[in-house]
Amino acid sequence: MIGSVEKRTAARALLAFGGNLAHSGQLPQEILQTAASMLGARLAAPLEMSRLYRTPAFPEGSGPDFVNAAAAVAWHGSAAALLAILHEIEAALGRTRRTRWEARVMDIDLIALGNEVWPDAQTQQGWADLSVEHAAHQTLDQLILPHPRMAERSFVLVPLADVAPDWCHPLTGLSVAQMLAARPAAERASVVALDSNA
């Protein structure tokens, strides 16, 4: 548990949800909705949620299809404090962390917090420039914001475009909508909206 949260001007936090394993009798889409409910209750703030989407596992062939979504929420605390809450909810839902990009019950990523850049522009860009092959074998040991791989992941950008299409990356100046439009058409088409009752 984290201690008291220092109050400050609210920033818009952008979050990405994803999971592809059933757990305790719940399907991935049900777990995602549970995670969103838990987070809204914990933050005592309404989440602006995207639709749910079915997406092929990344990397290709690494497991069952994922269910993904995104959310935006006003947050008055630090990025580190919010990340700690996200990790607590993941753990409560059965998340384990054994290998990079493994199948998982629930993953909640902090994609951005307003216009904050963590820890600095050079480090953020260094992670963003890593090849997929190198990224697969390196684990972040610190918070990097905005998420350094967001611009290359349609499974993040498609849901995020539901809730924050005009949010602009503080380093590149590109909006979510622009980043999404730059992705290959086949990749964008692979992210398919689910009926919320599916």
Image: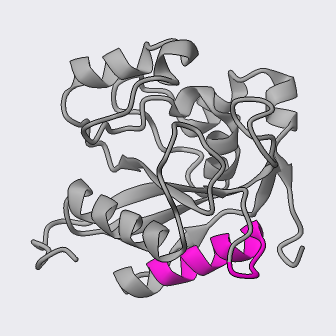
Number of marks in picture: 0
* Quadrant of the image containing the C terminus: bottom right
* Front residue of 152 and 89: 89
Image coordinates of residue 22 in percent, x first then y, are 74, 68
**Residue that appears at 23% across and 69% down:** 76
Give the color scheme: rainbow, by chain, secondary structure or one colour.
one colour
**Residue that appears at 33% across and 51% down:** 113
Predominant secondary structure, magenta span = helix
Image coordinates of residue 184 in percent, x first then y, are 78, 20
Q: Is residue 120 magenta?
A: no
Which residues fall within the magenta stretch? 24-39
Q: Quadrant of residue 102?
A: top right
Image coordinates of residue 161 in percent, x first then y, are 65, 48
From this view, report whether residue 29 is shown above or below residue 11. Answer: below
* Quadrant of the image containing the N terminus: bottom left
**Residue that appears at 73% across and 76% down:** 30
Q: Quadrant of residue 129?
A: top left
Residue occupying the far front of the picture: 98
- Left or right: where does residue 103 sit relative to residue 7? right
Image coordinates of residue 185 in percent, x first then y, are 84, 24
From this view, report whether residue 8 is shown above or below residue 80. Answer: below
* Front residue of 3 and 120: 3
- Left or right: where does residue 87 sit relative to residue 109? left
* Front residue of 135 and 168: 135
- Left or right: where does residue 145 sit relative to residue 17? left
- Left or right: where does residue 33 sit relative to residue 196? left
**Residue that appears at 37% across and 71% down:** 88
